[in-house]
Image (spheres, rainbow, N blue to C red):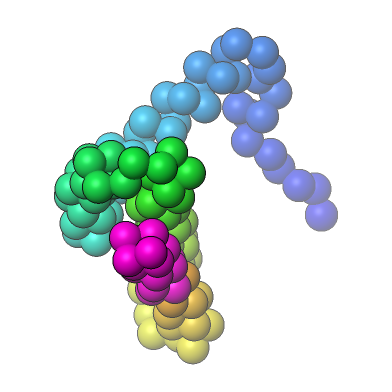
Amino acid sequence: MEIIESPHKGKTGFKRLLNAFGYSCAGLKAAFRNEDAFRQEVLLASVLIPLALLLERDMLGRALMISCVLLLLVVELVNSAIEATVDRISLEDHKLAKRAKDIGSAAVLVTLVNLLTVWLFILLR
């Protein structure tokens, strides 16, 4: 069986970087427009990131606090991509589709627990 790759795969250099940046911006825009959880987490980030800058004097502590917030956004984007892919394949109920979506959701939950743990350790030390 022949594998058909995207026609965009052959691009190299600055043109590829420009295309990749455009696709990334389109992905962020689509996630913000279509995903309630992503919008909520962006709102949370808009509160927590300035708070980290105000509350923590140590640069390493700030970096950890902010990186945990950004990691939450990354994991939510991946979870949303998994959900969109599963839904694109089929909207019918299926054990594997449910498993994929549940595991993506669990990744978000683990990331939230990580965020909370790191913030508490830093702020309560």
Main SS class of the magenta portion in the image: helix
Please say whether residue 13 is visible from this viewpoint.
Answer: yes
Q: Residue furthest front?
A: 125
Q: Residue at x 60, y 27 (%)?
A: 8
Q: Residue at x 82, y 54 (%)?
A: 1
Please say whether residue 105 is visible from this viewpoint.
Answer: no
Q: What span is colored magenta in the figure?
A: 108-125
Marker count (numbered): 0
Please indicate whether residue 122 sits to the left or right of residue 7 in the image.
left
Q: Residue at x 25, y 55 (%)?
A: 41
- Using the image as rendered, state which of residue 30 and residue 53 is in the foreground: 53
Q: Residue furthest right?
A: 1
* Residue 112 x/y as whole percent: 36, 68
- Using the image as rendered, state which of residue 46 and residue 82 is in the foreground: 46
Does residue 53 lie above or below 113 as drawn? Answer: above
* Residue 38 x/y as whole percent: 27, 54
Instruction: Quadrant for the C terminus, please.
Output: bottom left
Does residue 53 lie above or below 91 as drawn? Answer: above
Does residue 31 lie above or below 82 as drawn? Answer: above
Is residue 90 in the magenta section?
A: no
* Residue 70 x/y as whole percent: 39, 48
* Residue 99 x/y as whole percent: 49, 82
- The image quadrant that residue 87 belongs to is bottom left
Is residue 120 in the magenta section?
A: yes
- Using the image as rendered, state which of residue 105 and residue 97 is in the foreground: 105
Please indicate whether residue 38 sits to the left or right of residue 88 in the image.
left
Does residue 43 lie above or below 96 as drawn? Answer: above
Q: Residue at x 66, y 19 (%)?
A: 11
Please indicate whether residue 44 sits to the left or right of residue 22 in the image.
left
